[in-house]
């Protein structure tokens, strides 16, 4: 069955998702495709990204993979042009690509600081800079920036990671108030503990200890985060902009 018609909560919309070859980004790609979006998957993990796009096409979705490093300003222009040639103007941008660093506390070296800031903070800025002007000109668009509960409360992890995610909230609010008049909505989500490649280095004991602190007493599933992404991308969220939504089993309510 052809899914990219006007059916579904995202029927006919073109969605670009960064870091979508694996983890939560891949779940967002599947969920958005199921809701009728044309999905452009951007990542640096070529094989996994190509495979996911092909899998979505096999179930009747319109999907493409684009090799793209979010830290490269010139590459953003090429990506937008390529997505628009393939699917049409971008309606939804999900700035999902992110990295964690190993250092704990303030011990990060300059290289770790530069890497985490380049991907998690500057990557979001570059994405919005490349995509929002077109959305503003067309008078519609939804941007979803992926922050973290680490942006909302202090945690005994990497301080540069936390700082980069807190910056995402500033980028989100600034863009939301600047482009509201153009009907471009910009929101941030703050996932809590979701087991993906990113959390693979945490020991099972550490994961259990984290779960014990969460009011719902469990980790989140990628699909539970995707449900919020689909909602914010859809016209159901047409009056929602500038919000910061924790998806964390109640963790930041503690
Ligand atoms: N997993 C969690 O518990 C958790 C919690 C809060 C927030 N987050 C955030 O959610 C987002 C997704 O994380 P995840 O857990 O799915 O991680 P993941 O490591 O499974 O996936 C991240 C994806 O981003 C891609 N990527 C990395 N650097 C890139 C770059 N420079 N350009 C393009 N793509 C790049 C990777 O190849 C990978 O496919 C990240 O922004 C992360 O910080 C994760």
Image: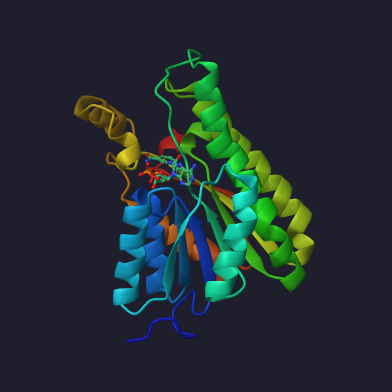
Name the foreground residue: 154 vs 139. Answer: 139
Q: Position of residue 181 (x, y in %)?
A: 79, 63
Number of numbered discs present? 0
Q: In the current view of this chain or complex, which residue is farthest to the left?
A: 204
Above or below, 49 against 194 in this view is below
Residue 84, quarter of the rendered image: bottom right
Please identify the quadrant where the N terminus is shown: bottom left
Residue 82, quarter of the rendered image: bottom right
Above or below, 142 against 101 in this view is below
Going 36% across and 66% down the picture, which residue do you hit? 53
Q: Quadrant of ligand 1?
A: top left
Q: Position of residue 83 (x, y in %)?
A: 55, 67
On the picture, is 4 further left or further right than 233? left
Whether residue 152 is visible:
no
On the picture, is 152 further left or further right than 101? right
Above or below, 236 against 12 in this view is above
Name the foreground residue: 182 vs 152. Answer: 182
Q: What coloring was used for the rendering?
A: rainbow
Going 44% across and 77% down the picture, which residue do you hit? 36
Going 50% across and 29% down the picture, which residue do you hit? 161
Whether residue 140 is visible:
yes
Going 48% across and 39% down the picture, which residue do you hit? 148
Q: Position of residue 246 (x, y in %)?
A: 48, 45
Name the foreground residue: 83 vs 202. Answer: 83
Please identify the quadrant where the C terminus is shown: top left
Q: Position of residue 201 (x, y in %)?
A: 28, 29
């Amino acid at each position: 069955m052809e899914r990219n018609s006007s059916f579904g909560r995202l029927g006919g919309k073109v969605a670009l998702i960064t870091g979508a070859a694996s983890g939560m980004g891949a779940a967002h790609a599947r969920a958005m495709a199921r809701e009728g979006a044309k999905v452009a998957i951007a990542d640096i993990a070529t094989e996994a990204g190509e495979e996911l796009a092909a899998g979505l096409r096999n179930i009747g979705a319109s999907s493409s993979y684009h090799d793209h490093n979010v830290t490269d300003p010139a590459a953003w222009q090429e990506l937008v042009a390529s997505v628009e040639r393939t699917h049409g103007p971008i309606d939804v941008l999900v700035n999902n690509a992110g990295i964690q660093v190993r250092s704990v506390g303030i011990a990060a070296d300059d290289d770790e600081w530069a890497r985490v800031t380049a991907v998690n903070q500057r990557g979001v800025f570059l994405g919005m800079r490349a995509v929002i002007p077109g959305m503003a000109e067309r008078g519609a668009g939804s941007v979803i920036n992926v922050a973290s509960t680490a942006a909302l409360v202090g945690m005994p992890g990497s301080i540069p990671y936390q700082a980069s995610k807190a910056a995402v909230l500033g980028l989100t609010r600034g863009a939301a108030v600047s482009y509201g008049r153009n009907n471009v909505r910009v929101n941030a989500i703050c996932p809590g503990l979701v087991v993906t490649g990113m959390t693979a280095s945490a020991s099972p004991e550490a994961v259990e200890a984290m779960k014990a602190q969460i009011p719902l007493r469990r980790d989140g599933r990628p699909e539970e985060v995707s449900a919020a992404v689909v909602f914010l991308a859809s016209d159901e969220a047409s009056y929602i902009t500038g919000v910061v939504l924790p998806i964390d089993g109640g963790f930041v309510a503690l």
